[in-house]
Image (cartoon, rainbow, N blue to C red):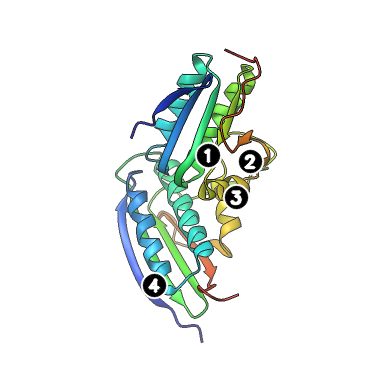
């Protein structure tokens, strides 16, 4: 049986300056779990990128959107649930771009997929926003 | 936060510091493009960058593209480990001109 333990959840509005607060919380949660430095940097960047996508594309830079982030600890992983209340994401449009196509923007999905072990949108009833789950298997400090 | 620009050895050196994210990357973009639009060769100093996300990287890519289109020098100097790891993930470490310190200018641009 997989045992999930909620570490922390936070709700913030879709203002870019809130991302710094989010990163601090993720870093502390990763420290609590004992994640090694490389994995900590990875989850901090990946969740930041996911929230940034919500702010830029979901809420189109409007500052009054709501974002909920819940961080769970499983036996062998950290799980991040990102909930927004924006228009539904078109899954077909969410894909990594060709890195040989050098242009500003469009890197977020590539970074999330590269840095997280799993990421997927979970089903929600229509009109209820989006729920993205990201999972990082735990490599603890001092382990090989 | 305003990112400072220093004139050094013929380059406009844009100094990015701390955490470069969606909150301040528009400032970084503006400073970099302002220098390039004055036909200045630009080096972006990333030695004091503790964190950079894809919006910060996009500012660098925009500078790179503008410089390439206008035949101006553009490069990165003193790239911190934190910044380099993101550039490598995006495979941009193979695209940007990256130097440990200011290179010598070779009679290109102004």
Nearer-the-camera pick, A8 or B93:
B93
Q: Left or right of B57: which side holds B3?
A: left
- On screen, B100 above or below A142? above
Which residue is disc 1 drawn over? B57
Secondary structure category for the residue under label 1: helix
Residue A81 coordinates in the image, percent (x, y): 43, 64
Q: CA distance from mark 4 to mark 2?
A: 33 Å
- On screen, A46 above or below A6? above
Disc 2: which chain?
A: B
Quadrant including the N terminus of chain B: top left
| Quadrant of the rendered image containing residue B22 | top left
Q: Earlier in the sequence, mark 3 or mark 4?
A: 4
What residue sits 55% from the left and 20% below the top?
B41
Which residue is disc 2 drawn over? B92
The reply to whether discs 1 and 4 touch (Cβ–Cβ < 8 Å) is no
Q: CA distance from mark 3 to mark 2?
A: 13 Å
Camera sees residue A111: yes
The reply to whether discs 1 and 2 touch (Cβ–Cβ < 8 Å) is yes
Which residue is disc 4 drawn over? A32
Q: CA distance from mark 1 to mark 2?
A: 9 Å
The reply to whether discs 4 and 2 touch (Cβ–Cβ < 8 Å) is no
The reply to whether discs 3 and 4 touch (Cβ–Cβ < 8 Å) is no
Nearer-the-camera pick, A85 or B21:
B21
Q: 10 Å neighbourhood of mark 2: few (<14), some, or many (≥20)?
A: some
Nearer-the-camera pick, A126 or B52:
B52
Quadrant including the C terminus of chain B: top right
Q: Nearer the viewer, mark 3 or mark 4?
A: 4
Q: Nearer the viewer, mark 3 or mark 2?
A: 2
Camera sees residue B59: no
């Amino acid at each position: 049986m997989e045992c999930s333990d909620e570490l922390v959840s936070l709700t913030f509005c879709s203002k870019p300056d809130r991302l710094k607060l989010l990163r601090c919380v993720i870093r502390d949660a990763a420290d609590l779990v004992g994640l090694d430095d490389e994995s900590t940097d990875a989850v901090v960047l990946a969740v930041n990128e996911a929230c940034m996508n919500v702010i830029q594309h979901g809420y189109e830079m409007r500052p009054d959107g709501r974002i909920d982030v819940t961080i769970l600890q499983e036996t062998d992983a950290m799980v991040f649930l990102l909930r927004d209340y924006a228009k539904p994401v078109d899954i077909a449009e969410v894909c990594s771009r060709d890195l040989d196509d050098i242009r500003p923007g469009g890197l977020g999905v590539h970074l999330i997929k590269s840095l997280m072990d799993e990421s997927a949108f979970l089903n929600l009833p229509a009109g209820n926003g989006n729920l993205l789950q990201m999972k990082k298997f735990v490599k603890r400090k001092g382990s090989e | 936060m305003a990112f400072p620009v220093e004139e050094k050895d013929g380059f406009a050196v844009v100094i990015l510091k701390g955490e470069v994210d969606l909150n301040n990357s528009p400032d970084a973009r503006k400073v970099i493009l302002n220098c390039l639009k004055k036909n200045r060769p630009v080096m972006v100093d990333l030695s004091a960058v503790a964190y950079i996300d894809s919006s910060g990287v996009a500012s660098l890519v925009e500078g790179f593209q503008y410089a390439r289109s206008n035949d101006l020098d553009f490069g990165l100097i003193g790239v911190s480990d934190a910044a380099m790891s993101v550039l490598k993930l995006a495979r941009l470490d193979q695209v940007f001109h990256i130097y440990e310190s200011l290179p010598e200018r070779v009679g290109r641009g102004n």
